[in-house]
Image (cartoon, rainbow, N blue to C red):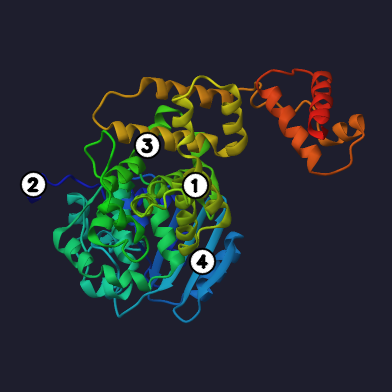
Amino acid sequence: MPEENLPHIDQERLVALLEWLPFNPAYWESPLYLVGGAVRDTLLGRARRTLDLDFVTPGPVVFRARQLALDLGAGFVLLDAEHQIARVVCADPAMTLDFAHQQGDDPTSDLERRDFTVNALAWDLHQRTLLDPLGGLRDLQARQLRMISPTNLNEDPLRLMRAYRLAAQLNFEIETATRQAMQDRVGLLKDVSAERMRDELAYLLECPRGAHWLMCAYRDGALADWLPEIALMEAVENGDTSHLTLVERTFEVVHLVDRVVEDLDAHQDFERSIAGGRSVRVTVKLAALLHDIAQPLTRQFHLEGKSGSISPEKLATQMSQVIMQRLKFSREEERWVTSLVFHHRRPAQLSSQPADSRAVYRLFRDLGEMLPALLVLALAERRAILDRLPCDLEFEQLTHHLLECYRTPGPMTNPPLVDGHTLMAKLGLSRGPRVGQLLGLIREAQAVEEVTTQQEALMLARVLLDELEA
């Protein structure tokens, strides 16, 4: 992009950032530089959810950081004694300050070790000047990610996945030579730990443009060692009305999740964390990515005459479980994803049948708190299948209706009319599976309003007990 067409970036934003610092930079006698994402995002005018600041200094780190923590009444964590990296955790205002000893003889040497030029900007807190030895400011203006060197990518291959994530977060493009260097090095990702790969994948899925860049990562081969099952889907012909291939449609479902969350006003259900700070949104997008993962094997079983050996839903659930464990997601995230994959067709099945309150209740019962997530996944898939065709108004209305029933107190969600202790006392029953069986049948009758009081529930229980014993 010609220089005259580049947007202006106001460096005075960095001066304003100093007002947030809980300490005077003069406290540090040696030069002190603010580096990393805080500089980049401040120059871009991006709001940050948390104030995490990274500093580099050629002077002593551990002693100074520990003393600063004492002066501020903050927490102190020694992150790396060998490389002199320490953290100060402030409570009010909530922020994290990381201090690291400068690598190399000068700040430029330190910045040259980083991943991308837009992350290699430093704000000299004493001189109040911006250090930009690698052209990061121009790349910020051009809204592109450019590597500092191929060697830096080799040193930490996770930087390949970070590039896709940053492109999604910042709405940037990846510079051509950088993209080529990334494609040449995707094989190095197999040596990255599962936990680090998981975290970058989750960060990417949190982004509104994450599906596009996840698709780019797949096309570049960056997912080959961690999600090889996706490539197997290339051989499956898409049998629906969409012009997309099965793989393209899968990524389109991931993309549509955010739009459906918006349309259903389901933000509150999706922002809460399930584990490790990873949200329901990430979990649903993982389920969207994996919901058709078994289609290649299902088609193969059909050709071999083994189609009745295992249901496609169960096979997809088992494969999803393997993938979630491979990437070291938590047990709770695994439970969510496998449940969503297993049940993802049920809303569509409801829409294709006459109205059945019992079937609706069983959906509520089986999914519980996951119901909003399932409805979003099902509607995203339905829209992806229809693609350029008019929307399925009946299915859209059903989804909105089910979500409204879930949110509104009523027969489907009201507390049970009778509990196990009452049932045992009134019917003279002992603890055992029979009690649970009766409670389930009564709860279903309550959901469809066949019983509305405890007395009616107990009367039904006696009838059911006689039938079960007969």
Instruction: Give the mark, 2 or 3, whose residue is nearer the N terminus.
Output: 2
Q: Nearer the viewer, mark 3 or mark 1?
A: 3
x, y (%) of residue 334? 53, 53
Label 1: which secondary element: strand
Instruction: Give the mark, 4 or 1, whose residue is nearer the N terminus.
Output: 4
Q: Nearer the viewer, mark 2 or mark 1?
A: 1
Circle 4: residue type: Arg
Q: Is residue 41 visible in the rendered structure shown here?
A: yes
Label 3: which secondary element: helix
x, y (%) of residue 336? 53, 47
Crowd tier of the residue under label 4, counting other residues whose Cα lies within 10 Å: few below 14, some 14–19, many 20 or above? many
Q: Which residue corresponds to mark 1?
A: 279
Circle 3: residue type: Glu
Q: Residue 381's mark?
A: 3
**In front here: 185 or 172?**
185
- Label 2 and label 1: CA atoms lie apart by 42 Å
Q: Nearer the viewer, mark 4 or mark 1?
A: 1
Q: Residue 87's mark?
A: 4
- Label 2 and label 3: CA atoms lie apart by 44 Å
Which residue is located at x 61 percent, y 28 percent? 361
x, y (%) of residue 462? 84, 26
Which residue is located at x 24 percent, y 50 percent? 172
Instruction: Determine whether 434 is above or below 448 in the image.
Output: below
Crowd tier of the residue under label 3, counting other residues whose Cα lies within 10 Å: few below 14, some 14–19, many 20 or above? many
**In front here: 52 or 286?**
286
Instruction: Give the mark, 4 or 3, whose residue is nearer the N terminus.
Output: 4
Q: Is residue 209 visible in the rendered structure shown here?
A: no
Which residue is located at x 79 percent, y 23 percent? 460
Q: Is residue 304 left or right of residue 408?
A: left
Q: Residue 4's mark?
A: 2
Label 2: which secondary element: helix
Q: Nearer the viewer, mark 4 or mark 3?
A: 3
